[in-house]
Image (tube, rainbow, N blue to C red):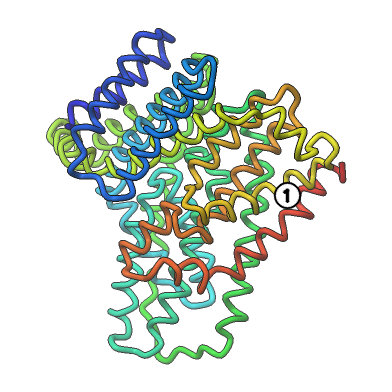
Amino acid sequence: MSVLLVAVAGLELMARFTGIRSVQDAAWVAMLLAVLMSARRLSLREHYLVAASAAVTVLVIVLRPEPNPILIGALDQAVFLLSFILLLGLLQATAKSSPSVADLGAFLTRQPPGRRYAALSGGTALLAVLFNIGVVSFLVPLIQRGIHRAAPGDALNPIREQRQISALLRGFAWSVTWSPTAIAPLIVADLLPDVDRIVWMGYAFPLFIVLMVAGWIEDRVRFRAFKPKGLSPIMAWPRTAALRFAATTGWFLLLVLGFVWLFDESIVFGVLAACPLMVIGWLAAQQGRAGVPARLRQMVGTDLPGSINVAVTLAASGYIGRAAAGLTPAADVAKALGLAAMPDWLILAILPTFTALISLLALSPTMMAVFLGSFFAALPVLPADPTLIAFSISCGWALSMTFSPFATLVLIVSRASGIPISTLTWRWNILFTTFAAILLFPVFYLLTGGQ
């Protein structure tokens, strides 16, 4: 199994480096074999998505006169997502063994009430640049242990848990709009032509700050009657750990930009190419050169197969989204919806809410991001600026992650914490999600100049 997973990621990287079609085809074969070999590890959700992939394949073959380009594009999308999550899984495993990351995680969970929301929301987003979705599995147990260690049996502990886990959820959800390693932007940037990722991040980061402040205010108002007793242990700022993590993040981003410049490629390519070098370099910094081979063997043998469920979920979602877009007559649908006559800002503001609502039909945010990116890419003329369309799609992904019971983030938090999915989304975060959805209307109005 491990050999096949390494082969998928290696062949995908080689195909991106060389542009040789036969190498990309070999990556397909390795991916399909890996999925077959991992059948016993997969949960009901992954089996359902694989079956849905097979069903949509049959529809493409039956309904489209030229199915090959659609299926080739869908397979390419699936291999990319599988490889991406596997490589990020190795980076996540490397981060998990970093003492600096452990110190920063502990610091975020041990702040006074007035600073805790901002620390957890903003800190989660920053850690996610290298840790990606693994930051959730890392921080949730820290939060729960910290709460019960500080005040065992306290009747107010469920409120503390709600406040801290909600801050984490919101911070990670909206970090996907600007983080250079977030999956959603990389998917959409790979599908839509002429997307400027730097400009996109320039739009997204101020919105993230506004929503973090809004979430902090909502938290303070909702729990204004909450009067904790006693003093929780507060951890001093781990200066050395923070500097090391900042240097590590900076080095990773420089590697990404270096590959982008050297090969005149996209950010997607840069992230994929930088991950293996980053993993080896970071392990060497942690354990010395002599310890790298043994740690790599352990990661490839244990951590890599442990990522297979999430990897298959994303790969199948990407395949379905791309194939479904190929089944959709994009130009006819756009004409029927009157997109050409609709103001740009209105299209862009409605799109995230549509994505969040449609996710209730068991369509994952990943699937919708791939579908929408492919749909707009198929239009002869885009109804709005491509960078703003990409930004809008990523906002829909962010909304879904605090609203949809099928979002991977929510499933992981629920599994790690034991908190029901409906509690994490509709009970705890419905007000915040609604506010964020409404806020997007004036945001896109301003960004388009009211056009």
Q: Label 1 belongs to which residue?
A: 349
Q: Is residue 379 above or below residue 102?
A: above
User: Quick check: 206 left or right of 75?
Assistant: right
At horizontal 52% and vertical 33% (from top left) the residue drawn is: 324
Horizontally, residue 416 falls left or right of residue 195, namely left
Instruction: Report x, y in % for residue 245.
Output: 40, 47
Would residue 165 appear left or right of 22 to someone viewing this image? right
Q: Position of residue 336 (x, y in %)?
A: 76, 37
Residue 311, position as x, y percentages in the image: 33, 39
Taking the view exactly as shown, the residue that stands out farthest to the front is 62
Q: Quadrant of the C terminus?
A: top right
Q: Residue at x 48, y 42 (%)?
A: 366
Tell me the element at label 1. Answer: helix
Instruction: Please tell me which residue is depicted at 72% across the width and 59% down the height of the picture.
Output: 439
Q: Position of residue 191 (x, y in %)?
A: 57, 27
Q: Quadrant of residue 409?
A: bottom left
Q: Residue at 49% across / 66% down in the picture?
A: 425
Q: Quadrant of residue 13?
A: top left
Q: Amino acid at mark 1?
A: Ala
Query: Is 185 or 273 nearer to us in this picture?
Result: 185
Q: Nearer the viewer, residue 325 or 127?
A: 325
Rate crowding at label 1 as few (under 14), some (14 to 19) or many (20 or more) other CA atoms within 10 Å: many
The quadrant the N terminus occupies is top left
Q: How many marks?
A: 1
Whether residue 267 is situated above or below residue 39 in the rendered picture: above
